[in-house]
Structure formats: structure tokens, C-alpha cells
Image (spheres, rainbow, N blue to C red):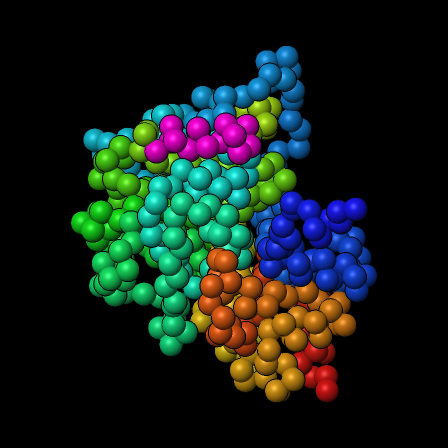
Amino acid sequence: MVTMDEGPFRTVPKTGVIFVMGEAARFGYTPENRAWANLGQGAPETGPLPNSPQRLTEITCDLATSEYSPVVGAYALRQAVADLYNQRYRAGSASLFTAENVAISPGGRSALTRVAAALGRVNLGHFLPDYTAYEELLDLFRRFVPIPIALRRDAGFRIEVNELEREINGRGLSALLISNPCNPTGQVIDGDELRAWLDMCRQTQCATIWDEFYAHYRYGDLKFDSAARYIEDVDADQVVILDGLTKNWRYPGLRISWTLAPKQVIQRIASAGSFLDGGAPHPVQLAAIPLIERSRADQEAHSIQAAFKKKRDYAVQRLTELGMRLVLPQGSFYVFADLSGLPEHLRDGLDFFRRGLEHQVITVPGEFFDVNPGKRRRATSRLRHYVRISFGPSMDELKRGFEALTRLVRSK
């Protein structure tokens, strides 16, 4: 008899957050258990915030929306996305997005998978640390070669544009994958710096893929920015932008995302979607259209920025008091905390996570963000002394979590 271990199916690794939640469940965690605090979650609180627009509570399904949507997405939603980006970032430009520059996908991972499937035989640069789900995604499609670019803690997990240009030329990179704001470090590329990145990549003919799923979570002076602002020609510049309702509109359960790119790239992404996922749910796409109308989208962003800045400041203060070393996050809803200053038994992120479960608090070990497709690098992770702390939950849960972290750090 052939056992499953001997059969045709490989072992598929879990993403870092899924592993963390599975381990927490073994210790008795459930979302309803108010004794726990989930500071590992990758989703924002979804209820009303002060001054936020009314939340969507119903989705209608009729005969028309019972039919399949086009794989590339419902035309009305694609045009609404194009309109939002034109109004926010391209006013006065001769080159504007149209519906043909937009594809709709059933969630962010699906959008990223479509883009990965559409890439050719190129060297693709990605940064460390970065989003845990990139690891398996970058290993799954063997047509391109993922090339890591390590960001230094002493440089604030940032890279200067001239140094990046050397990486592109020296490593023969044809494309870059960038999360901006970054998960997990919360660092942001915007304004003149973002313009310089786009200009340099245009000159070196290096395509850029911008994961902007945290674009509304910005705590500096520039409240709205996007790679979309600095594109010269929407059909000539090799710039791909991904975003969606998951984080920036706080509707993770709706599983609606979009990709903006040159028309020819969108056609290829849609072709990939035809065999990968088949398209996003039709009724949900139509329900999303009012959410991304400019004034409502801006209102949501401003309410997020006000509420989450308070939570960021609270998290930073508490973590600093506990003796952790931080680079102040300028975006996202995460703090990437260095444990090196804690007692020796708490300096390893995986040990810290496991000890935290005994105190009913969840964190994510930093080594999970040391994206290593195919496990090609064998060295011990340089991020093993870090944890990611989420301030995505409500303030009540955040306070509960920091009380638990305080007990953990003071324990023997």
C-alpha cells in the first residue's frame, strides 16, 4: 500500500502567521476567548472607528450577479479603482488609468500569485525582512529567480536609492517586489524618495511591483502617496501596484483586491487568473464600488490614521518600557521589536513566542520574515532576535496584550 508520505503530494509549509495561530489554538486560543490577546494578527479591527464612514453590512445577490464575473473583474469596479487613483494621484496628468489598467482578484495573495505567474525568466529582487507569505510564493514559480536584498537594522531597515541601483545592476535584476509601507518593519518610501526610486528603475529598465496594502496606515506628514503618483506613462512604465479592501478599508473577509499596471500586463495577469482562481465573487465586487468612491475612501483613511497612530504610540511606549529596541514604524500596524536587550531566555523570537502562549498572548517570531524561498540560505536567521507585534486589534485587546507581555518579561 502507498502511504500519503510516499504519494505524489509534497508537504506544503504554512505561512508564519498561520503557524502561529495553529500553535496558539493548541494552548486554548479562540477569537472569542477574552482572556487572550492576539498581537500576532495580520488584520485590523473591522468595526466602526471615530469619524469613519458607515460600515457595509449587507451584500445583495441577484440574477445578474449570480453569473460569473469576468476573470479580469467587473468593469464598473475596475473603472472605479482607476478613477480613485486618477483623482488622488494623477490630477493634471496627460496619462490616466482606465478600466483596462485594472484587474480584480479574490484577495491579496491571489493578486500576488497572478503577478508571479505572469513573470518571465528574470531575476526578481525582494527585501529582507518582508511579508512571510512571499516565501512560498517566490518558490512556487520556478520561471524567475528570487534574489534577496538584506536591509540593515543600523540603517533603519531602509536602502538608499544609489545603493539599490548598484544591487539592480550588480545582480542583474529585471524586477523588484516591494511592500510599502513594509510588513513587518513599518518603514515607508514616499515623496521625493519614492519619485527617485521610480526614476531610477525607469532608467535601469527594472520593473517594480508595489504591494500597497497598508497605504492608508501612514503616520508622517504625507497622508496619501503611491507609486501611482510618479508614473510618467501608465502604459509604458513597468510599474505594478497591488491594493485592496483587506487592510486599507478594513474588510479582510470580503477578499477583494486590485492590480494596476500597463494594459498589456493586465491582460497577462488576467490570463493567469483564468487558471489560478477564476475571478472574484461577482456580488462582492459590485458591493465594493461605493466603498472606494473618493470622499468615502479618504474619510476611511483619515479615521484609520487618527485611531491607529494612537495605538502605535501606545505600543511603542510600552515596548520601550519593557526594554525592547525599536525602529519607529511610519506605516502599517506593526512594530518589529528587537529582543536583544531582554533577559537571555527571552532574546530568541521563537522562544519568546512560545513563552508568550503560556501568558495567553500571541506574537510572531521575527525569523518568519527572513524570506528564504526554497531554503537556499542555510545560516541561522539574523532576525531570530526579533518579534513582530501587531497593533491591529482594538485598544482594549492591545492593553490586555501588553499586560501579558509585562508578566512575560518579568517572569523567570
Tell me which residue sits at (38%, 53%) in the image.
Answer: 145
Residue 98 rendering spot, x and y as whole percentages:
34, 26
Residue at position x 67%, y 61% from top?
20
Tell me: residue 409, above or below residue 327: below
Q: Is residue 385 above or below residue 30?
A: below
Residue 56 on image: x %, y %: 62, 33
Would residue 67 be visible to someone looking at this image?
yes
Farthest left residue? 203
- The stretch of residues the image draws in magenta is 265-279
Residue at image position (26%, 56%) is 172
| x, y percent for residue 118 | 40, 38
What percent of the width, then of the height, locates residue 101? 35, 30
214 horizontally vs 59: left or right = left
In the image shown, does 7 or 395 lie closer to the viewer?
A: 7
Which residue is nearer to you in this view: 271 or 24? 271
* Residue at position x 63%, y 72% in the image: 350
Label tally: 0
**Depicted 63 relative to depicted 371: above or below:** above
**Residue 31, placed above or below residue 284:** below
Q: Is residue 83 visible?
A: no
Q: Nearer the viewer, residue 82 or 111?
A: 111
